[in-house]
Image: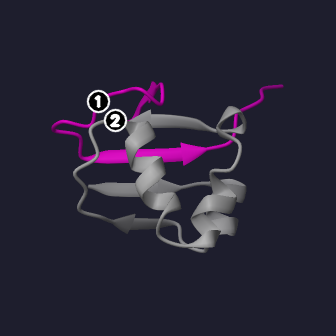
Amino acid sequence: MNVLYFAWVRERIGLPREEIETEAATVADLVTELCGREDRYAAAFADLSALRVAVDQTLSDFDAPLVGVREVAFFPPMTGG
């Protein structure tokens, strides 16, 4: 699955995207798995209330299932104006 990082999430992790293999059942499980990799992931995901997630380009919740998902994107909340 492709995992994409945007804005300050990308800056903290140091990558715009990566392809990973995971057994995670939900987005939250994926976040837990990523946080276990390195401190930079833990720093990026320290406050999930400051993050949004899209699953296959559809805005989702962290409890969204990952079965059959090709892409997960993490980004800060968007503001309009």
Q: Name the element at disc 2.
A: loop
Left or right placement of residue 81 versus residue 56 in this view: right
**Pointer 1 or 2: first along the chain:** 2
Query: Would you say the magenta stretch is mainly helix, strand or loop?
Result: loop
Badge 2 amino acid: Thr
Task: Check disc 1 and report the residue beneath it.
Answer: 65
Q: Residue at x 72, y 37 (%)?
A: 50
Left or right placement of residue 18 versus residue 78 in this view: left
* Picture coordinates of residue 74, whole percent (x, y): 54, 46
Marks 1 and 2 in Cβ contact (< 8 Å): yes
Mark 1 surroundings within 10 Å by alpha-carbon count, few (fewer than 14), some (14 through 19), many (20 or more) = some
Task: Check disc 2 and report the residue beneath it.
Answer: 26
* Picture coordinates of residue 47, whole percent (x, y): 71, 42
Q: CA distance from mark 1 to mark 2?
A: 4 Å
Left or right placement of residue 77 versus residue 53 in this view: right
Q: Residue at x 69, y 67 (%)?
A: 11
Mark 2 surroundings within 10 Å by alpha-carbon count, few (fewer than 14), some (14 through 19), many (20 or more) = some
Q: Which mark is residue 14?
A: none
